[in-house]
Image: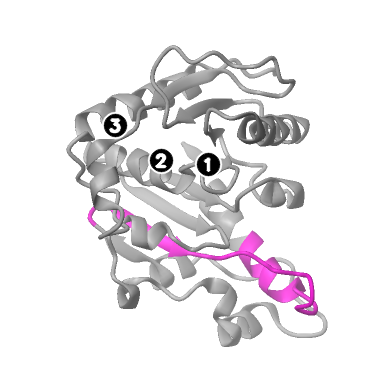
Amino acid sequence: MKLAVAGKGGVGKTSLTVWLADYLARRGEEVWLVDADTALSLGQALGLKEGEIPVPLVQEKDLIRERVGEGYIRLNPLVEDLPEKLAKKVGNMRLLVMGTIAVAGSGCACSPNALLKALLAHLIIERKQWVIVDLEAGVEHLGRGTVEAVDGLVIVSEPSMRSLQTAAKIGELARGMGLERQVLVLNRVEDGASLPPLTGLPPLAATVPLLPSLLKRQLMSPSVLALEERDKLDEIAAKIISALRACEVSP
């Protein structure tokens, strides 16, 4: 299954991405993790040191020039060999750091964007393993249509109106692109939370409570793995995957 994780900045989507991947990897699944967020914090959340995190693909100027060209660019560059070359192995997970394109004031972003889209499409369409993409905060990636081929969308929100409004906007935009298999996860909230009637908000699949061990750790380490509440997080991950598989998708 190929999943994308989206949400407003600061809601915990990167942490949830890692928890989902770790849950699957410990059950023998091979998981590709794709960091497509401006913050580029997925490697840190996995516990990697600064020097262990791969260079973002958007910064590989020589590789972009070699595969895409300049001036008249190749819109379908060769990318089949890149995942193994660029990925960092973390247990049964592989991390690819792609980054995102900052267009304003940065000149033409056509070449790096062409390579990013081609590599992401290859991972989602051609690969047989699990792929989980940590999207840029907000709706930017969905607006560019870079993840329309994923099997499902996990939208993460905090229990606040602003966060839920962003979640609803993401859900509505994704549904307009044909991505109907989507679920909502509420972070930092206990069970029993009620949701406002916002158009576009997907069904609630799971809630993640405040995690005392994470609160203790986060000032000293960015890693979100091997928490004391791992069994609870495994239950949450299983609920999310089960809810995605159960989603009815229109033919």
Q: Are the residues flagged by discs 2 and 1 in contact, CB closer than 8 Å?
A: yes
Residue at numbered disc 1: 5
Could you tell me how far apart the alpha carbons at marks 2 and 1 are, in whole angstroms? 8 Å
Residues shaded magenta: 91-117
Q: Earlier in the sequence, mark 2 or mark 3?
A: 2
Eye-nearest disc, 3 or 1: 3
Residue 123 visible in the picture: yes
* Spot occupied by residue 42 in the image (x, y as percentages of width and height): 41, 57
**Label 1 environment density (alpha carbons within 10 Å; few <14, some 14–19, many ≥20):** many
Q: How is the image coloured?
A: one colour
* Spot occupied by residue 23 in the image (x, y as percentages of width and height): 28, 37
* Spot occupied by residue 19 in the image (x, y as percentages of width and height): 33, 41
Residue at numbered disc 3: 233
Numbered circle sitting on residue 16: 2
Q: Earlier in the sequence, mark 2 or mark 1?
A: 1
**Label 3 environment density (alpha carbons within 10 Å; few <14, some 14–19, many ≥20):** many
